[in-house]
Amino acid sequence: MSTAALPQPRETRVFRPLTVLLLVLAGVFSASAFMVLSAYAPDLRGGDDGGPHALSTSAVGFAGLVRLLQADGVPVEINRDGPDKRDPRWSLLVLTPSPLVSSAADVMALAKARNASTLIVLPKWQTMPDPSHTGWVRSVGLWDGNLVAALLGKDLDAKLARRSDDAPTQLIAGPGWSLPAFAEGRIDQLQSLSARHETTVLQAKTGEPVAGQIVGTPIVVLADPDLLNTHGLADPATARSAVSLILSLRANDGPVVFDVSLDGYKHSPGLLKLAFEPPFLGATLCLAGAALLMGLHAAYRFGAPERTQRALALGKRALAETSAGLIRIARREPHMAGGYLELNRGEVAKALGAVRLSGADLDAYVDRLGERVGAGSLSQLAAQVPQVKDRDGLVRFARRLYQWRLEMTRERR
């Protein structure tokens, strides 16, 4: 039978090294991505929950206004940092508070933090999610007027009023304000606001104040959100009025910023997030590098890991090692040559069946038999015992004696 016909041994490895490396890299990447996404998950929410804010595409949301301004060439930004971020480039800050998650203190603190042009859009419609369309809402009525007015605090003593029809509304500038002409559009149950320490910026032709500026501040309050939200922008005339209002309130050519922190989308601090942001990002990268080096060291180190030993060993082996250590410490190894000779003499006598012989008779019998088989003389080996003076000499003598024993007894190695 040829060598090629013989069955070849099957490879016992379960995975190739390259496969294992790819699995490890995939696991490390997945774990790292999971940690990063877990840290920034609250900040990555889409926000299309149907609420009255700039991330919502529902009828009461303002995502339509954001896209309309962008299409008109106006830079728009979404702010999730609340009052912590104050950029002097901003031309207008738009706040859209909700009675469910906002308070008067939060609204006014955010409006006064910049001391720059700010527009507060009050809520109007109370809604519920539409079960047939994700992100859509259904109206369940109007918010209570006192609840909406409370978003401005008690100092303004604000009061809301609403029409009972959806007649076309002609908007005009308030006394002392020079604003571009506003188109006529239909506003369902127009919501107006009257407050202490407020001057009218925009009003209906019939006299209801729709927008007013708080005296001594650059803060403008818009009473009816249907002038800006997606529901109102469905009317082209209202859409033109919305763009005109935003452009007239801008302080410069900077971006118009829609704040969503009042609607529950504020950047939330966290310990895990700190690990991925300066100045702690450097420490995180150093830890990742150290972990990589430790992994490489564990993968390519020489030999198997050393097993830990007991401080006090147990069993026959421990007893033998302890005795050997004591003999070595006492430097008594050369004196073991005579004892090892007697041990091998007894084993050979037992193997030859000469256990009844002893002393000179046994040596003479063994020597005669050794000369016959060519193994050598035991007497000559016994004469070498006094010549053993150190450990190396004992090792050489033990090897010769062991070889003689194997030849006499025909034992297998």
Image: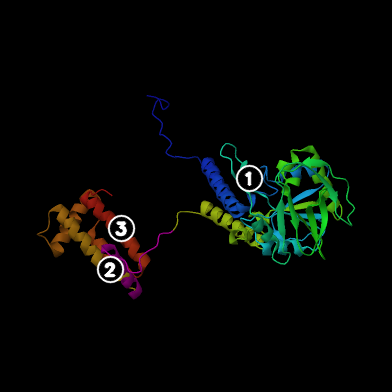
In the image, residue 169 sits, relative to residue 177, either above or below, namely above
**Is 230 on the left or on the right of 403, as rendered?**
right
Q: Residues within 10 Å of mark 2 (few under 14, many from 20)?
A: some
Classify mark 3: helix, strand or loop: helix
Does residue 307 show up magenta in the picture? yes
- Could you tell me what secondary structure mostly forms the magenta stretch? helix
Residue at image coords 87%, 54%: 252
Does residue 211 show up magenta in the picture? no
In the image, residue 124 sits, relative to residue 388, either above or below, namely above
CB atoms of marks 2 and 3 within 8 Å: no
Q: Is residue 35 visible?
A: yes
| Closer to the camera in the image, 383 or 75 | 75
**Is 272 on the left or on the right of 357, as rendered?**
right
Which numbered marker is on residue 336? 2
Q: Is residue 228 visible?
A: no
Give the residue type that dot 2 points to: Met
The picture places residue 249, in percent across and down from the top left corner, at 84, 53
Residue underneath mark 3: 400
Q: Residues within 10 Å of mark 1 (few under 14, many from 20)?
A: many
The picture places residue 40, in percent across and down from the top left corner, at 62, 53
| Closer to the camera in the image, 387 or 199 | 199
Give the residue type that dot 1 points to: Gly
The picture places residue 390, in percent across and down from the top left corner, at 36, 69
Mark 1 vs mark 3: in front? 1
**Is 12 on the left or on the right of 62, as rendered?**
left
Give the residue type that dot 3 points to: Arg
Classify mark 1: helix, strand or loop: loop
Which region of the structure is painted magenta? 306-330
